[in-house]
Amino acid sequence: MVNFMMKKLFLFLFVFTLALSFVNAEPVDNYNEFQYVEMALSLSSYVDLEHTSGSHSVEYVRSELSFFPRDGDRQDVKDLEAFSSPSSTIQQGTESITYTWSGDEALRLSYSYDAVVRVENSLTRIDQKIKFPLAKLDSIVLEYTQPTEFIDINSKIEKKAKEIIGTEDDLYEAVFKIADWTNKNIEYNLSTLTAEAVLPSSWVLENRQGVCDEMTNLFISLLRSVGIPARFVSGMVYSNTDYSWGPHGWTEVYFPEIGWVPFDVTFGEYGWVDPSHLKLKDNIDSGSPTAKYSWKSTGTDLNVGALEINTEELKVGPVKSGAVEVEVIPMFPTAKFGSYVPVEIRVRNIKNSYIIPKIVVSKAPGLTEKNVKSIFLKPKEEKSIYWIAEISNDDPGYIYTTTLEAKSMYGEVGSSIIKYGGDFEFHSKESALAFVEGQEERDEKEELDNIDISCSTGKDLYYSGETATIECEVKSNHNSPMDVDICFQQECTKFDIGAGDKIVASETFDLTEGIRIPVVLESMDKIKYEYVNINVIPIPEITISNPDPAEVNYHDQAEISFDISSNTDVTDLNIKFDFGEMSYDNFKAKEVRTITINTLGRDLMSDIKFEMSYKDELGMDYREQKALHIIVKDIPWYGPFVNWMRNIF
């Protein structure tokens, strides 16, 4: 009954009470990037005494509250003050805050605390492989490998855990595989039975659904079934669904010689949790109550009130330095309408420790699957994950440019673009799926050693519409001949290279935009990557636009402004026009300069003409003419004749 009531309590708080807990004029989407979050936390509840007979007495009533913040590796309790009404004896220990009332002077006994807690955005540093299975464990953590009422273990759970882990012998990666499987295969569903009462892990595995504590329980059961210690953590966390804090459950996994490392399978945060995770309790099982009550009385019952919990941000630290670098590489820079384009997201770990970043594709024309994936990276490791972008069918008379953007959960962003239209090459879904499947198989291979590859292009910069040839020299340092494939995107050639030999391979590309070409050197069981950047500059175009106002009266004095912009960087830009001259040594792409002139409306009867000269990034000279049209109203009958005469002379 306690478990059922606590579940109901948490849901009630999440849906109703905590909707009022966060007030901010500009709601935060998440706190992932900040160095810390400092929060104010308040909790309150009450016990009502109900006298059941005329003869009654109360010697004492005691509430032992275990749901409160403690100092830890990630969080610092800056202040915590407990209160009660009427006055009680309050004792704060490591496991509980105990409120003890004596006598029965009051029918309602209220208790509460106010706290200020700072939670750090810290990544547990694990820089060495820890062998799995675990051969030896400290006796103090053995209980966290045992089944409990809700974190149960049966043959199906143990079989599934072993199936997920496979032959993996790295503890960190084994834990990640189980976490990622749980996140992907258990549906978060508030409409199920699990929203009303805690159900055991075996039920969750069988039905593949649950809320955060059931997902967490199953994750813990899978870990414990293969001897990995794990415990249930409960507390508060920020959600951008309603921009407030609510109750939440996650996991801490024990790593020998490291300690307890957080994993949140609901949020997809592995080995790290964002600093809005305010820990209030850890336990062997999710079913333990947040408060226990005891009393000694005659003729009196207790009615326990709900916990009221409020959390709000006080301040946040500055943006934290990044953990990864993210690069977005479409396999084709152009595609025909209806195509499917494989997209590689290359992620580099810049830390000297294991990390498991979550990557979100935040901008794309369409995707064939969910836009979120996690990737396991060893210290300084670089790996790729893949999506397939689905190109829509639009007006065939136009060429469209769309942005591909990916973000890590730490805040780093990478982007690229794809152009699509009716005249580009078509790429089928089948070929895209085959490519991604092949790449994912490649990523399981070890790095090809004792062989060097060096690639180059003929020029540093190209114009759109030119062709570029990538030439790669491959040198073998092996003691025996070997067969290798050299692949430029999807075009592969097989070579037989002898010991100490050199070979040269090349491929030519038609250019429309700058592109990063992956060159793959692959043997039967090993692989090596080389990436070649081809930088493309567009033909420069200076734009004169946005006249303000766009209409003037013939007889009025007019102040006209307009914008000058360029699609690419240019130098030595000189602009002569009817009302003056301007020069710029450097004019940057997407830079906008606003020019203002004062004249009479009658002087704008003819378009304003501009003569421009400039150089592109390669030093090529350009000259062009532009015109800007202003509408002139209320023109008298003689206006066109006067304007004609002025143009003659």
Image: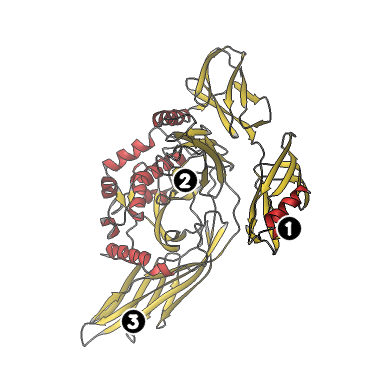
Image color mode: secondary structure
In this picture, residue 26 sits left or right of residue 504: left
Amino acid type shown at disc 2:
Phe
Please say if the residues under marks 2 and 3 sit with CB atoms less than 8 Å apart: no
User: In x, y percent, where is residue 388?
Assistant: 44, 36
Q: Nearer the viewer, mark 2 or mark 3?
A: 3
For label 3, count other residues whose C-alpha is less than 10 Å away and answer few (under 14), some (14-19) or many (20+). Answer: some
- Estimate the spatial distance between the alpha carbons at disc 2 and disc 1, rounded to whole Å: 71 Å
Tell me if residue 189 can be seen. Answer: yes
Amino acid type shown at disc 1:
Ile
- Estimate the spatial distance between the alpha carbons at disc 2 and disc 3, rounded to whole Å: 46 Å
- For the residue pair 108 and 426, the one nearer the viewer reads as 426
Quadrant of the rendered image containing residue 632? bottom right
Earlier sequence position, callout 2 versus callout 1: 2
SS at mark 3 in the image:
strand
User: In x, y percent, where is residue 90?
Assistant: 43, 76
Earlier sequence position, callout 2 versus callout 3: 3
Q: Nearer the viewer, mark 2 or mark 1?
A: 1
For label 1, count other residues whose C-alpha is less than 10 Å away and answer few (under 14), some (14-19) or many (20+). Answer: few
For label 2, count other residues whose C-alpha is less than 10 Å away and answer few (under 14), some (14-19) or many (20+). Answer: some
Q: Which corner quadrant holds the N terminus?
A: bottom left
Quadrant of the rendered image containing residue 55? bottom left
- Mark 2 lies on residue: 255
Earlier sequence position, callout 3 versus callout 1: 3
Q: Tag on residue 597?
A: 1
- For the residue pair 549 and 402, the one nearer the viewer reads as 549
Q: Tag on residue 108?
A: 3
In this rendering, is residue 585 above or below 449? below
Tell me if residue 591 can be seen. Answer: no
- Estimate the spatial distance between the alpha carbons at disc 3 and disc 1, rounded to whole Å: 77 Å
In this rendering, is residue 88 above or below 591? below
